[in-house]
Image (cartoon, rainbow, N blue to C red):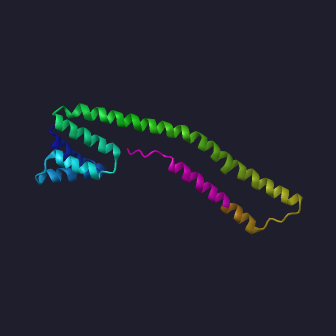
Amino acid sequence: MPLYNAMVNASKNFEVIGKYFREITDKVDLGTSIEDALNEAVEFIPSNDFRKILWQMINSIRTGSDISKSLYSAMEQITKDQVNEVNKYGKKLNPLAMFYMIIAVILPTLGVTMLIILSSFIQFELSLTILIALACFLGFVQFMFISVVKLSRPPIEF
């Protein structure tokens, strides 16, 4: 299948990446060479992985080599990088889950229980404002843990 037909097919079948291929094919339809259209697209595409693929396409066009082999090797490398990122995330997530269980679940549960029990022994009055402030603080701690987990997630798109 010619490269141009493959890009037209990709622009029709893939939602996110299709708009970039559509722009490239539109420029080619208007008379720009495929190489120039790909060079222009490389400057504006936000994804580094997609940029690598376009560079492989440009290099294959320039050298006249088989584009399928270079794209296959580029995709293998991108896949390996993504698998490594997911593995690193998994290793990082285990300690985060442990700290979450200790700090955001076990300590507040035992702490509030102990606070209520001790307040009855030492005649300390727990008012509603103290309990609400404690609940707000615990909610903030929960939110911070969720934010840390979300920010540490690798940017992988499937």
As for residue 145 lying within the magenta part, the answer is yes
Q: Tell me residue 28's x, y (percent).
A: 14, 50
Relative depth, front residue between 23 and 117: 23
Please identify the dominant SS of the magenta region.
helix
Q: Quadrant of the N terminus?
A: top left
How many numbered markers are drawn?
Answer: 0
Relative depth, front residue between 21 and 117: 21
Relative depth, front residue between 76 and 34: 34
As for residue 59 lying within the magenta part, the answer is no
Please give the name of the residue rendered at 24% of the width and 50% of the height, measured from the top-left corner: 41
Please give the name of the residue rendered at 18% of the width and 49% of the height, measured from the top-left corner: 37
Q: Quadrant of the C terminus?
A: top left
Q: Tell me residue 63's x, y (percent).
A: 17, 34
Quadrant in the picture for residue 138: bottom right
Quadrant in the picture for residue 139: bottom right
Query: What is the magenta range?
Result: 137-157
Q: Tell me residue 43's x, y (percent).
A: 27, 51
Please give the name of the residue rendered at 34% of the width and 45% of the height, measured from the top-left corner: 48
Instruction: State left or right for residue 52 relative to residue 157.
Output: left
Outermost residue, left direction? 31
Q: Tell me residue 92's x, y (percent).
A: 55, 40
